[in-house]
Image (spheres, coloured by chain):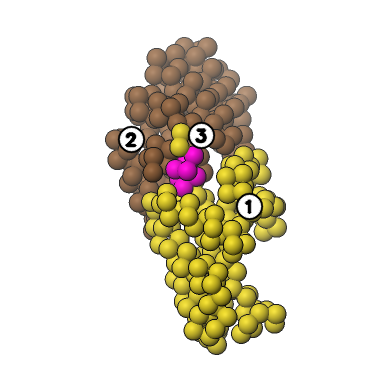
Chain colours: A yellow, B brown
Amino acid sequence: MDLKSYISGYVDGEGCFCISINKSSRHSFGWELRPSFSVSQNSDRSEVLRLLKQYFTCGSIRPDISDKTLKFEIRSINDLVHKVLPHFEDTKLISAKQNDFKYFAKACRLMYSKKHLTKDGFNGVLDLAFKMNPSGKRKHLRHEIKI
Amino acid sequence: MDLKSYISGYVDGEGCFCISINKSSRHSFGWELRPSFSVSQNSDRSEVLRLLKQYFTCGSIRPDISDKTLKFEIRSINDLVHKVLPHFEDTKLISAKQNDFKYFAKACRLMYSKKHLTKDGFNGVLDLAFKMNPSGKRKHLRHEIKI
């Protein structure tokens, strides 16, 4: 068993690379861009979430209020850039989720280098966010967020 | 990337080892016991299903009528015993799904050696089937099938 490959396989099925976009008066341009890597699981099968937390040496496991699952999530941009991106760049996903990951990685690095604090950088991250998870639901449309 | 470990990881999240139980006048004791290994996926992310079919060199991919997913499934008892069980015995699941797999493996081998054609063997497979996927829904209760 190669743990790195097992983890990429598990995440290819169950994981989510996501950039959520929320209105926020505390953030530049009135919007918060929040990248996260997460994996949800029924609480009776939480072994793998604990394994992921241990493997990535960061993140948290908490109940997901939207349903009866547990969610392992890494939100720290520092951890995403230094621990999550290198793993999935080394041991790649095989499904089309790999495309989401590539956009996610670009967005994380733009944010890590504070590029999103400029208008161009902000719009760049936003464009990447809207390319991701095309079949998922979004609270806001792209044109609502034009700054 | 170690493909075997990737596959065990993917299946640990998305796969299902299941023994369905259906009334059938064509089968011994009036019930059909049908073991299957399956993985479902949205049809826009079917790469991994094709990879599984190629890896196991058996099974089929077809639309799941219950929802808009595609399902890769292996039902042949011969393929289950000779191709599926050895993979997961060599490269083990990490989640509690491993328990389901162990019951599944026992049941498949009982059926492969035709033990389920005797009353004791049939009840043995049935007991294993009811130990599996305890959180899943069942069409029939155990006592309905006592033979």
Mark carried by residue B93 = 3
Q: Circles 1 and 3: CB distance less than 8 Å?
A: no
Nearest-to-viewer mark from 1 and 3: 1
Nearest-to-viewer mark from 1 and 2: 1
Quadrant showing the C terminus of chain A: bottom right
Residue at mark 1 to residue at mark 3: CA–CA distance:
23 Å
Residue at mark 1 to residue at mark 2: CA–CA distance:
35 Å
Foreground pick, A112 / A124? A112
Percent from the top left, x then y, of residue B121?
A: 49, 14
Residue at mark 2 to residue at mark 3: CA–CA distance:
17 Å
* Region in magenta: A3-9
Residue A134 visible, this angle = no
Q: Residues within 10 Å of mark 1 (few under 14, many from 20)?
A: some
Taking the magenta stretch, the answer to whether it contains residue B59 is no
Query: Does residue B113 appear left or right of residue B121 in this picture?
Result: left
Which callout, 2 or 3, points at the residue further toward the start of the chain?
A: 2
Query: Does residue B21 appear left or right of residue B114 in this picture?
Result: right
What's the residue at 58%, 49% (across, down)? A56
Percent from the top left, x then y, of residue B10?
A: 46, 43
* Residue at numbered disc 1: A58
Q: Chain of mark 2?
A: B
What's the residue at 62%, 55% (across, down)? A73
